[in-house]
């Protein structure tokens, strides 16, 4: 399998020669820090949502002396510990957007003035609604995913961090760094309870994103003929169909000329095709 570092190319233009395997083109897309951040962030959000929900809807009282329990204390401690991981991870992710490859920047970009991008976003929405027969292939995120990631996770994380640390500053006290940096948020929203409410709404925006995101990742992994979930693990995107793979001259093989066996031979002439039972005999 060959991998290429040049990810600027759309998947449907001539690319590096393909592989010995049947129809395989592989491109390195998500670097290690992006993948590490993705999974740590997913875990942090799971803890934040579960503990946040319990902060808003505390469990019924436990039996016995209140002083025997520290349940809400543990729940809040978990929330704040995960919050620090979430916030530091987000800062690290912003840093990587500057120093990483151009896919690392995609989540922070919203190409509002790019008419082509909006057209493709519309096409992608039609594909998700089962109104298109074939998806467009993307090396990085598709425009619809980019849109959701920008608003729900890019802007959404910033919102949760700012409102979260403003609430935290109330407990940490005046003159704590949290209060000095984020104290202004409380009067901006009105009062503390308003910030609680908006912080809570933010959780549901992120959770809605997560539900759709996981559905889409599994769906596209099955339907789009390109790797999706394994790409967020290995970093490498593979394209599974002949028309998405290039021949040995770096040209795409048009669908009408597509023949799995021939492409296999042409793209790797040195390797012999597997023998048929008749040949073996
Ligand atoms: C709390 C849970 C999750 C959150 C908040 C989340 C968020 C994100 C974000 C922000 C990205 C963009 C990454 C970047 O450009 O830096 C992303 C990509 C991705 N996520 Fe998640 N994710 C979550 C859970 C999952 C799970 C459980 C799966 C697997 C089923 C998954 C599969 C993927 C895949 C495959 C991509 C890359 C999509 C592509 O190839 O374009 N995510 N996710
Ligand atoms: C995805 C990220 C986050 C989610 C889903 C989340 C969720 C929640 C929820 C649902 C609540 C209860 C709000 C209410 O109805 O009163 C809450 C409270 C709170 N959160 Fe977060 N939060 C997140 C990030 C953060 C961050 C980054 C901080 C920063 C330290 C933070 C600090 C707090 C504080 C201080 C409270 C109030 C605790 C209390 O009153 O006992 N949260 N969070």
Image: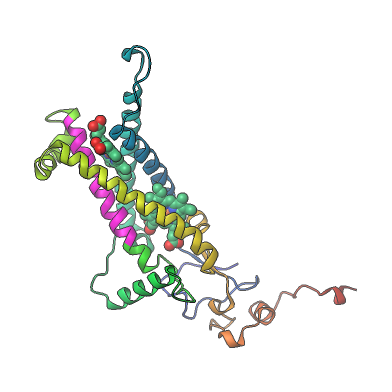
**In the image, residue 75 lies at what x, y percent?**
34, 29
Q: Is residue 88 visible?
A: no
Q: Is residue 46 left or right of residue 183?
A: right
Q: Is residue 153 a member of the stretch shown in magenta?
A: yes
Magenta extent: 148-170
Q: Magenta stretch: dominant SS? A: helix
129 or 225: nearer the viewer: 129
Regarding ligand 1, which quadrant of the image does it lie in?
bottom left
**Residue pictured at 18% horizontal, 33% vertical:** 169
164 or 139: nearer the viewer: 164
Q: Is residue 67 above or below residue 243?
A: above
> Residue 62 appears in which quarter of the rendering?
top left
* Position of the C terminus by quadrant: bottom right
**Residue pictured at 46% horizontal, 72% vertical:** 137
86 or 101: nearer the viewer: 86
Q: Is residue 21 left or right of residue 4?
A: right
**In the image, residue 260 lies at what x, y percent?**
66, 78
188 or 226: nearer the viewer: 188
């Amino acid at each position: 399998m060959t991998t290429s570092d040049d990810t600027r190319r759309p998947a449907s233009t001539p690319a590096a020669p393909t592989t010995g395997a049947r129809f395989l083109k592989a491109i390195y897309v998500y670097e290690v820090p992006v993948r590490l951040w993705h999974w740590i962030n997913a875990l942090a959000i799971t803890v934040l949502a579960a503990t946040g929900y319990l902060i808003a809807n505390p469990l019924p009282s436990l039996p016995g002396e209140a002083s025997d329990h520290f349940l809400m204390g543990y729940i809040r401690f978990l929330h704040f510990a995960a919050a620090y991981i979430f916030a530091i991870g987000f800062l690290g992710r912003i840093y990587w957007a500057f120093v990483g490859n151009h896919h690392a920047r995609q989540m922070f970009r919203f190409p509002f003035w790019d008419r082509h991008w909006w057209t493709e976003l519309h096409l992608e929405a039609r594909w998700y609604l089962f109104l298109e027969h074939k998806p467009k292939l993307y090396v990085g995120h598709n425009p619809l995913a980019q849109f959701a990631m920008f608003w729900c996770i890019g802007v959404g994380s910033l919102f949760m961090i700012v409102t979260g640390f403003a609430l935290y500053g109330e407990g940490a006290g005046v003159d704590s760094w949290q209060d000095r940096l984020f104290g202004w948020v409380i009067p901006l929203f009105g009062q503390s309870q308003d910030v609680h409410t908006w912080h809570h709404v933010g959780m549901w925006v992120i959770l809605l994103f997560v539900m759709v995101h996981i559905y889409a990742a599994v769906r596209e992994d099955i339907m789009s003929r390109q790797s999706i979930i394994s790409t967020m693990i290995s970093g490498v995107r593979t394209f599974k169909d002949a028309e998405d793979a290039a021949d040995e001259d770096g040209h795409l093989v048009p669908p009408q000329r597509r023949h799995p066996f021939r492409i296999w031979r042409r793209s790797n002439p040195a390797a012999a095709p597997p023998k048929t039972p008749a040949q073996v005999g």
